[in-house]
Amino acid sequence: MTLALVGEDKTARERLREFLRIYTSVNTRLAYATDLGIPLDWVPGYVAPDPSRRRGRKRARPTGLEWLNWCSSNGMRFAEVRVEHVERWLDELAEAGYSDATRGRMLSAVSAFYAKYLLREGLATQNPVSLVDRRAQHLNKPSGTPSTTKRWSFQACRALLMAAYLLKDHRRDGLRDRAMVEILIGTGIRADELTGVNLDDYRRAAAHDIGILRVHGKGGKDREVALAPPVADALEDYLRVRVEPAVPALLGQVGNGTRPIFITSAGKRVHNSHLQAVLTRLCKAFTETSSRQQWMRDLLATPDAEFIATHLGPLRDAIHPHSARHSYATHAVERGVPPRQVQRDLGHSVLATTEGYLHDEDNVRNSAAHELAPALHRGWLATSS
């Protein structure tokens, strides 16, 4: 693989680490590294998983067809690559059994590598991916193809919030879990953004005011999102019982001395798998019929529990955090929020620039969160005094 970068003033490892540092999330770095064929131990911030842990994403072993490995085996320098080489690579991936979705994702990783690093560093003069006929490669969805992300209904969002609220005092991490669910549904931020927030990313001027949370988005772009009062209240309920880890932060787990908001009982930053587990657990708690403690049997006999079971039952086997993002956008637009404001809330990549709103207080106060949160909580959550 190093052959593609031979002769430059930096080693291949140094250059590839420079590219990956463009992305603030370690999970994003790992995704690009996997698709490009960068060794995982070259990824800044990566810590090898504990083999005793059952949770977490299992990454596929390199096959030799990842872009960097393919270039190396074919003796190519990046500046010499043309569109016909990229198309030949895609054909070889297809012959090896890679799905169209996987090939499309890997092609996007190569495009980002050229556009965000190689061109800027003078290591290439063009982005050959930009000339690839994606339709001929079967990498484009037909016009009008709906998103495969399952949107939660408005009532399902209410049911998730109610479930987290009703269970918050009955689980060791109930307040933490409820705060994560409130923020996920109430802001539409990505799972990586939620688990990546730190204590100094949150602020609130007064008890009844909105909260403001700085999230670290894709491409190293930070933005501020609004936490409507019920959401900020849930976060502060958790922060009052949050226990600071007894040991210093560990590299790759909670960052370089950063203090994550959401931590495990061991003091480590929560992983996306924790968030997935919370959503799954909320669904199962109200839809499974196995024996429970008396307090749970009493709870299941209430109208609230019946409402929750009705709307979470269809989700229990396929619930995923990213659905909250899709649901936020859909419900906000349906309630009359301008699409441009929803794009700002989500930090969507189609925006021409994010500089104008990253720290714009007016945009935060115009957030769709102020329209959605009251409606989602109306009728079951009493207003804080």
Image: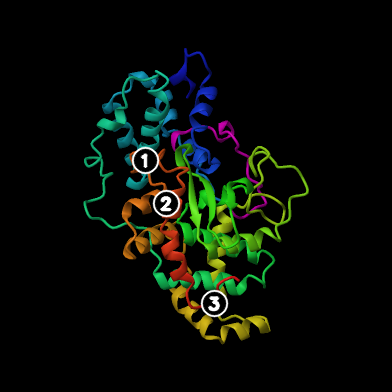
Q: Position of residue 261 (x, y in %)?
A: 63, 52
Q: CA distance from mark 2 to mark 1?
A: 40 Å
Horizontal side, residue 369 vs residue 262: left or right: left
Can you tell which mark lies on residue 345? 2
**What residue do we see at 48% from left, 61% from top?**
186
Taking depth in this image into account, of 324 and 362 the one nearest to the observer is 362
Q: Earlier in the sequence, mark 2 or mark 1?
A: 1
Q: Residues within 10 Å of mark 3 (few under 14, many from 20)?
A: many
Check the image and name the residue furthest to the right: 246
Q: Residues within 10 Å of mark 1 (few under 14, many from 20)?
A: few
Q: Position of residue 306 (x, y in %)?
A: 50, 83
Q: Nearer the observer, disc 1 or disc 3? A: 3
Q: Position of residue 381 (x, y in %)?
A: 54, 74
Looking at the rendered structure, the kind of residue marked 1 is Ala
**Which residue, given by chain and number where applicable, does mark 3 sit on?**
286
Q: CA distance from mark 1 to mark 3?
A: 44 Å
Horizontal side, residue 242 vs residue 280: left or right: right
Horizontal side, residue 161 vs residue 142: left or right: right
Q: CA distance from mark 2 to mark 3?
A: 31 Å
**Which residue, given by chain and number where applicable, does mark 1 sit on?**
96
Q: Secondary structure at mark 2?
A: helix
Magenta segment:
35-55
Asked if the residue under mark 1 is in contact with the one under mark 2, i.e. CB atoms within 8 Å, the reply is no
Q: Position of residue 315 (x, y in %)?
A: 45, 69
Identify the image quadrant of residue 332.
bottom left
Image quarter hosting the C terminus: bottom right
**What residue do we see at 62% from left, 55% from top?**
54
Q: Earlier in the sequence, mark 2 or mark 3?
A: 3
